[in-house]
Image (cartoon, grey):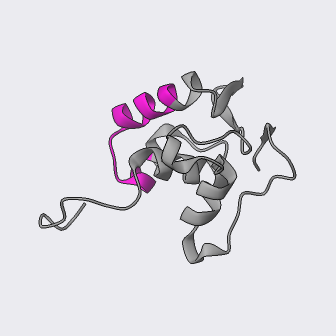
Amino acid sequence: MTHPERRWTFLTNHTRVLRALARDPEVRLRTLAATCEITERTVQAIIGDLEQAGYIRRRRAGRRNQYALDLDRPLQHPAEAGLNVRALVELAAEGGTQSPKAASASVTVS
């Protein structure tokens, strides 16, 4: 963040990472960190969290990773009952009109 007076934000780093992975499932960690304005170490931890919770799957493709999002997986918190990852990613998309380019859940978003 460039403004020191900002102490909170509506979107979490986890949401930012999910949104970036939905846009580019082959994104490099360094690019992902720069896009989300967080460190590579933080991105690695977030990807670990998301993978462990079943929201993403990582697959090696040569020297790179490809990520698949489970867009129909429900959000974890009881206050978000009935919402899934797809709704979150679409809500967080710039302009509110961009959505992940996936026809169904559990497919590689590309």
Q: Residue at x 18, y 68 (%)?
A: 3
Magenta part, dominant SS:
helix
Q: Which span is picked out in magenta?
A: 33-49
Residue 69: x %, y % from top left: 69, 40
Q: Is residue 44 above or below residue 3?
A: above
Q: Is residue 83 magenta?
A: no
Q: Is residue 36 magenta?
A: yes
Nearest the viewer among 61 and 78 is 78
Q: Residue at x 46, y 44 (%)?
A: 14
Most distant residue in the right direction: 103
Q: Residue at x 55, y 22 (%)?
A: 52
Q: In this rendering, does residue 24 appear at all? A: no
Residue 2: x %, y % from top left: 21, 65
Nearest the viewer among 75 and 59 is 75
Query: 35 left or right of 72?
Result: left
Q: Is residue 92 above or below residue 38?
A: below
Query: 80 left or right of 54?
Result: left
